[in-house]
Image (cartoon, rainbow, N blue to C red):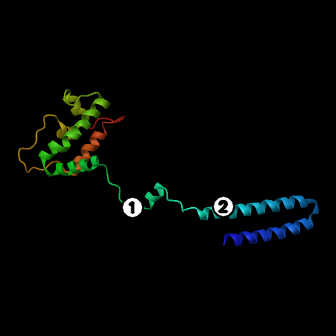
């Protein structure tokens, strides 16, 4: 198919060259040079096609192969999954709140208090309470003990969201929680 197309182009180029050489004899050498250049390009095109036909088909790149695979939903990192479990369990039981999620939030609160306010959560309870606010302090204060009843529920999701918002307010250019 490519050879037929190239032969057709060569015949058309020859007809144009003959007409141009007859109409503009002063430009004859340039017309013939352009015609030869076009014939050479067509020959190279045919040669490249023949070489390409003789080679094995290219393998898809690793990127193309990965993109062609059926999509899977990406899995969240294991740390995020574990934190999600702690949040779920914290609401189910006050004891699980104290042993699972609360220690993580206490470390976050202690780090943010120390970094942004120069306050140590355990050593400076009054300053920590003022910076955290009453809601966060009630849940994170160092002397808070788990409920005696195993069936008592931990903080609900809305309370945990409010606590996270209070901890976020401890960051840069933010006032302490009211």
Percent of width and height locating residue 52: 61, 62
Residue at horizontal 14 percent and vertical 46 percent from the top: 96
Q: Quadrant of residue 6?
A: bottom right
Q: In this view, which residue lies farthest toward the front?
A: 54
Q: Name the side, left or right, on which 59 lies relative to 70.
A: right
Give the answer, above or below, for where 48 lies relative to 111. Answer: below
Q: Name the side, left or right, on which 68 lies relative to 129.
A: right
Give the answer, above or below, for where 137 lies relative to 48. Answer: above
- Element carrying mark 1: loop
Say which of 125 and 59 sits in front: 59
Q: Quadrant of residue 65?
A: bottom left
Q: Earlier in the sequence, mark 2 or mark 1?
A: 2
The label number, if any, that marks residue 172 in the structure image: none
Percent of width and height locating residue 88: 20, 52
Percent of width and height locating residue 122: 19, 29
The label number, if any, that marks residue 48 in the structure image: 2
How far, Cα to Cα, is label 2 from label 1?
37 Å
Q: Quadrant of the N terminus?
A: bottom right
Residue at horizontal 17 percent and vertical 36 percent from the top: 141
- Element carrying mark 2: helix
Q: Quadrant of the C terminus?
A: top left
Residue holding disc 1: 71
Percent of width and height locating residue 99: 15, 42
């Amino acid at each position: 198919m490519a050879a037929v197309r190239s032969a057709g182009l060569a015949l058309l180029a020859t007809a144009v060259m003959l007409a141009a050489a007859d109409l503009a004899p002063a430009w004859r050498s340039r017309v013939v040079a352009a015609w030869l250049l076009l014939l050479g390009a067509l020959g190279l095109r045919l040669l490249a096609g023949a070489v390409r036909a003789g080679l094995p088909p290219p393998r898809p790149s690793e990127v193309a192969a990965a993109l062609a695979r059926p999509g899977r939903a990406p899995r969240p990192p294991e740390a995020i999954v574990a934190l999600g479990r702690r949040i779920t369990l914290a609401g189910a039981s006050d004891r699980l709140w104290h042993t699972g999620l609360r220690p993580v939030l206490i470390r976050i609160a202690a780090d943010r208090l120390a970094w942004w306010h120069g306050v140590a959560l355990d050593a400076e309870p009054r300053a920590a309470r003022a910076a955290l606010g009453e809601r966060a302090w009630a849940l994170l204060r160092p002397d808070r003990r788990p409920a005696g009843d195993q069936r008592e529920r931990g903080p609900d999701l809305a309370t945990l969201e409010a606590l996270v918002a209070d901890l976020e307010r401890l960051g840069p250019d933010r006032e302490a929680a009211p």
